[in-house]
Image: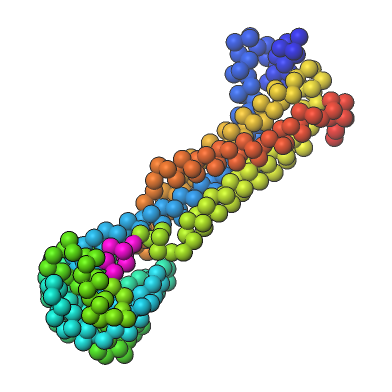
Amino acid sequence: MVMSTQLGCRNLITGGAILRPAEIDSSMDNLVTSNIRQRPIRTLVSVAGIALGVCLVMLFTGLSRGMSSDLQRRATNVKAELIFMRPGAINTTGSTANLDVRYVDRLKKIDGVEDAIPIIRHFFQGTGGVGIEQIDGVDWENYARMNDIRIVDGRAPQSQDEAVIDQTKARNANLRLGDLFKPFGPQGYRITGIYSPESGARVKLTLAGLQDALQANGKCTFIFVKLRDSTQVSQMAKKIDTELPGNTIQPVSEVFTSFEKSIPYLGVFLRVLVGLSAVVSALVVMLAMYTTITERTREIGILKAMGASKGFIIGIIEKEAILISLIGLVVGFAVSAVAGYLIHQVYGLVFEYSWQWALTAGSIGLIGGVLGALYPAVRASNLDAVSALAYD
């Protein structure tokens, strides 16, 4: 009896066509898709809500992973084993030139130290006003020799108003030999060379040039220490600390750690972001489905009057929510990919997406849509048939 009345309901909703039993599931699917087509604005709003949640997760996690991989890749091209600096000289978003360069000579006198090179590092507002970039002041010949870096185009900087950049910086910022690089406003540095591989900051001035710009003559931010025996890192760190106490001596690999670990509470932020994305997706779908029930009150009343079960009505609304969620996922992933590409082209920011976060974003969108539609679906299934039929 229930099956026959549900079949009759479907016949009514689909224009009175007589359906064979094999067409029952197909007719239900047609009902779901027709509801979506008949209410395009509501559907677009719901899809946009799901897509927004997906984009938030993918773009933030992609940027985090991309910047982490970028920093780690550049750090691995630094061949020094230890970094010597004053406590607090460098952090995630800034640095201080507070170390006397005369420590270089004292470090070189320590048995087991092969070379020591002073570096002054400065953080400045990124290109286009987005993000923070780094610039290094180095003794180019010594730095290039220690880290196996070569000039692939042009020449090394020879005066305080010259700079070299790596190939990635040249490509992303569309810089060429002879262009002016202006990290300090009107004052510019002529680009004389492009180097490879990438190592440390992407832009390098002469040590004297950056000292002059920052009014830090005779100072540096840290000193790279190259050891004769690269397996004696911890032993040499203790030895240097004994001979030159009061300073910070750390392995290079620990100082230039992953981006996620270097920013406090970034993991917590990402988890909160995921939670908010799920809430946004669920609320948008819930509001859309709730509106749908109001619009289709008489239709639901007809279904109930003809014997449609609660499960049948809930199934229609949940199927519609799942279809909307799937469309939102596709749109969200597509927008994330396009947005990441455009941001990379314009600002040079690196995005690295992962399947793990893609699955997380997909689960958020789908589960959020299903849960968001659950309350409206249950409410619709509990409508009184007589009251629903009398609804205007």
Quadrant placement of the C terminus: top right
Determine whether 315 is above or below 170 in the image.
above
Could one spot residue 159 in this view of the protein?
Answer: yes
What span is in magenta? Answer: 250-257
Q: Is residue 3 above or below residue 373?
A: above
The image position of residue 167, as x and y in percent, is 22, 64
**Which image quadrant is residue 256 in?**
bottom left
Give coordinates of residue 279: x percent, y percent: 62, 48
Left or right of residue 56: residue 279: right
Q: Quadrant of the N terminus?
A: top right
Q: Is residue 385 above or below residue 69?
A: above
Q: Is residue 66 above or below residue 387?
A: below
Which residue is depicted at the point 49% across and 61% down? 265
Residue 299 visible in the snapshot: no
Q: What residue sits 50% from the left and 40% below the top? A: 362
Q: Nearer the viewer, residue 82 or 26?
A: 82
Whole-percent x and y of residue 220? 27, 82
Q: Residue at x 17, y 61 (%)?
A: 231
* Left or right side of 173 for 32: right
Q: Quadrant of residue 43?
A: top right
Residue at the image point whose x is 56% and y is 38% from the top: 366
Relative placement, left or right, of 177 versus 315 is left
- Residue 174 lies, in percent from the top left, at 28, 66
Magenta stretch contains residue 309: no
Residue 6 is left or right of residue 344, and the answer is right
> Residue 36 appears in which quarter of the rendering?
top right
